[in-house]
Amino acid sequence: MNDGNGIKVRIFDLSKGLIEYEHIKVIRIISKDYNLLIMQDYLPIIGEIDGSVDIKNEEVELNYKNIKAFYMNSGNVFNLMIKEGN
């Protein structure tokens, strides 16, 4: 669980390992089959991405383009496991 102030994001890829961010306000997923906008208290969801992910708050703006990854969102914790991409 998170502290109730935004979303905790955990990103894992083989080149950089595990990176964590706190207090994220919005996560945008653009995949070949769907678009999602995930915000605090979003419903639990799991899926696969073939596209891009944008992660933003006041201090952080991450853009992952042309990736293949798996994600899970539950209890205001978003996990992204990148298998191919930048």
Image (spheres, rainbow, N blue to C red):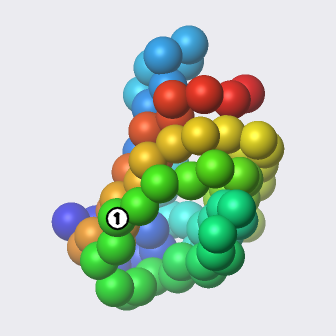
The foreground one among 68 and 27 is 68
Please name the amino acid that badge 1 sits on: Ile
For residue 63, side relative to residue 22 (left or right)? right
The foreground one among 46 and 62 is 46
Residue 46 x/y as whole percent: 34, 64
Tell me, yes or no, if residue 19 can be seen here: no
The residue that appears at 44% across and 47% down in the rendered structure is 70
- Identify whether 77 is placed above or below 65: below
Q: Quadrant of residue 57?
A: bottom right
Residue 4 x/y as whole percent: 33, 78
For residue 30, side relative to residue 25 (left or right)? right
- Identify whether 20 is placed above or below 18: below
Q: Which SS class for mark 1?
A: strand
Q: Quadrant of residue 28?
A: bottom right
- Identify whether 26 is placed above or below 51: below
Tell me, yes or no, if residue 53 can be seen here: yes
Q: Residue furthest toward the front?
A: 33
Count of numbered circles on the image: 1
Residue 40 x/y as whole percent: 45, 82
Residue 5 x/y as whole percent: 42, 76
- Identify whether 50 is placed above or below 19: below
Instruction: Report the quarter where the N terminus lies.
Output: bottom left
The residue that appears at 52% across and 35% down in the rendered structure is 82
The residue that appears at 47% across and 54% down in the rendered structure is 48
The residue that appears at 54% across and 77% down in the rendered structure is 38
Residue that numbered label 1 is attached to: 46
Instruction: Report the quarter where the C terminus lies.
Output: top right
